[in-house]
Structures are given as C-alpha cells and as structure tokens.
Image (cartoon, helix red, strand yellow):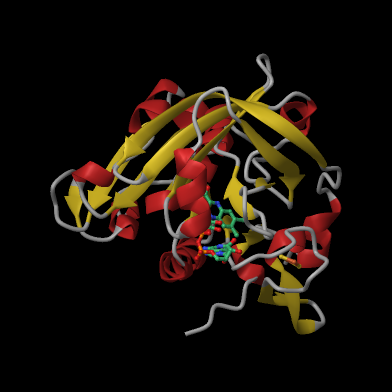
Amino acid sequence: MKLSSEWGKSALKKYDVRNCTILKKTEAAEGIFDITVEAGALAGAARAGQFAQIYVPGKTLRRPLSICEIGRADRTLRFVFQVRGEGTAVLARLRKGETLNILAPLGNGFQPGDTSRRALFIGGGIGVPPLLEAAKPFGPNAVLAAGFRSRSAVILEDDFNAAGCRVRIATDDGSLGHRGLVTDLANDLAFDVIFACGPKPMLRAVSLLAEKRGVPCQVSLEERMACGIGACLGCAVRLRGESGEHYGHVCKDGPVFDSRNVVWEA
Ligand SMILES: Cc1cc2nc3c(=O)[nH]c(=O)nc-3n(C[C@H](O)[C@H](O)[C@H](O)COP(=O)(O)OP(=O)(O)OC[C@H]3O[C@@H](n4cnc5c(N)ncnc54)[C@H](O)[C@@H]3O)c2cc1C
Ligand code: FES
C-alpha cells in the first residue's frame, strides 16, 4: 500500500505569485463561471489536479480553486468555479482584461501513470473541472462519468469530447442521461484505474467501488482552507499509513490522495 508520505514525495513543491490577466470569461451554467488567465511560468509548472489560491479583493484569505486546464503553448490556466459565498461572488464579477492575483501551483495533483490503461474519471458537479486536464492524455482510453443536479447544470461535456474521451452523464432529476447516482454509470464499464473528484459521500462510494473491482483509485478531496500551503494546519484529513492512522493536510499532502490512504468517516 502506498503511504501518503510517499505519495507526496514526487510532488512539485515550487509555487509563485503572479498577477494574471483574464483573457476569457464565460458563464458555463447558472452560477458557474469559466475563466482563462494568462499565467506565464505558472502554466509551465502546473500539473493536473493541483490548485491555486486566488486573491479576492477585499478579503484576507485567498480562495482555493482547482486548475481545470493548462495551456502549455499559450501559457494559460483555466478555472471553473461555482459561486458559493462572498469570495466567489466577487471573483464572478471580474471582467475580461482585469487581473487575478494567483498563488500556484499548489499541492499534489493526479499521477496519471500508464495512459494506455482504461481510465474511469468520476466527477460530481463542480468536482468535474479538475478531471479535465488529467483525462486529456488518456484520450479514447478515458470515460468520464459525470453527475449533475439537472441538465442545466451540466458543464465541460464538450471539452471532454474534444479531448477524445467518452462521456456518460447522470442527473438527479433524469433530465439528461441516467437518472440516479453517478456511480451507477460504472456498473457496465470495464476499467483499470479510477480518478475522482466531488462530494465526500460520492468519493467514499467511489473508493468502495475501486476496492470491489480491485483497481487503484485517486481521489481529490476538498476541505475548508486558509493558507493553502501547509502553514495554518486548518485543512486536516484523517489518513492511513503503515504506522497506523494519522492526520495529514489536504493542501500539502493532497488534494489528491490514493483512496486506500483516506479514512472515510461514516
Ligand atoms: C483544493 C480545492 C480546490 C477547489 N476547487 C474548486 C473549483 O475548481 N471550483 C469551485 O467552484 N470550487 C472549488 N473549491 C471550493 C472553493 O474553494 C470554495 O467554494 C470557495 O473557497 C468558497 O469561498 P466563498 O468566499 O465564496 O464562500 P464562503 O463560504 O464565504 O467562504 C468563507 C471561507 O471559507 C473557505 N471555504 C468555503 N468553502 C470552502 C470549500 N468548499 N473548500 C475550501 N475552502 C472553503 C473560503 O476559502 C473562505 O476562506 C475548491 C476547494 C479546495 C479546497
Ligand atoms: S490550509 Fe493551511 S494548512 Fe492547509
């Protein structure tokens, strides 16, 4: 079993702060915004599944957002976020041409490994964006199983299709695709590895699915964060290692973990 401490060893530890000009901004679905920024060297350093701490004018604490897509050639980073409170509401009001102050890249991202494997990407709602960059190298070997409240909340379907991935959708109300849980979509699929991001109960179910199918699984966790760099000890998560259970930090040891190393609270 891979230890969480080993998991972090291959991590890219370098991060920087930069004022990034907003090149593009759209509303992807109601209350969900899609922003691409000119990110210079941050784009070269970023890896799929890492995140950024975004300065919000008027707020002391930065807000963590996952890196959705990395434009290596044009040195851009893309973020897709949902308005949840005051900070994200301020970010949603920023316009093209304005700047975002970004601390990035942070944390340990996904470890894609052999991209000729059949990969299942499972995303719940706003948990879908961090999976896009990780799925791209798998192309047709990747299936995205994405769950949303309803058809109107579906995001990034075209982007996964453009990357050559197959897409399956589940909605709570049945307005698109399968009516029911996103994990139901895995029932008739064959896969060698799982990558997942979404609400904790979904990740717990995905972890059980991986165990049942005997495949490795990487999960991206979300916890309330303050510093984002391991200094405030605010984002604790219970982990399991060879020496037993211990607390780690989502920002420094994650946000991506081997699902077997997470202690899933009932
Ligand atoms: C590693 C990571 C990646 C994330 N990626 C995305 C993403 O790609 N898209 C997206 O829409 N959301 C993402 N989130 C959640 C996003 O950070 C919160 O929705 C956001 O911080 C809420 O800020 P607020 O000011 O609007 O809300 P408020 O509730 O007013 O925030 C108050 C404080 O709590 C913190 N906080 C609140 N909710 C969360 C949360 N869920 N996670 C962490 N801190 C929180 C805020 O940063 C702020 O310091 C991510 C969270 C983490 C930890
Ligand atoms: S947010 Fe400060 S230690 Fe993780």
Residue occupying the point 74% across, 42% down: 104
Please say whether residue 140 is visible from this viewpoint.
yes
For residue 100, side relative to residue 88 (left or right): right
Q: Nearer the viewer, residue 33 or 5?
A: 33
Q: Position of residue 118 (x, y in %)?
A: 49, 39
**Is residue 106 or residue 261 the one in the foreground?**
106
Can you give x and y, in whole percent of width and height, for residue 238 in the image? 67, 78
Q: Quadrant of residue 166?
A: top left
Residues 189 and 17: in front is: 17
The residue sitting at 64% across, 40% down in the picture is 112
Q: How many marks?
A: 0
**In the rendered image, is residue 196 in sight?**
no
Which quadrant holds residue 14? top right
Figure check: 262 above or below 134: below
x and y, in percent, of residue 3 in the image? 77, 67
Q: Is residue 126 left or right of residue 236?
A: left
Seen in the picture, residue 70 relative to 168 is either above or below; the reply is: above
> Viewed as shown, does residue 74 lie left or right of 45?
left
Ligand 1 quadrant in view: bottom right
Give the residue at the far top of this rendering: 73
In the displayed structure, would residue 157 be above or below residue 54? above
Q: Is residue 252 shown left or right of residue 92? A: right
**Residue appearing at x 66%, y 48% in the figure:** 55
Give the image location of residue 244, x and y in percent: 76, 84
| Viewport quadrant of the N terminus | bottom right
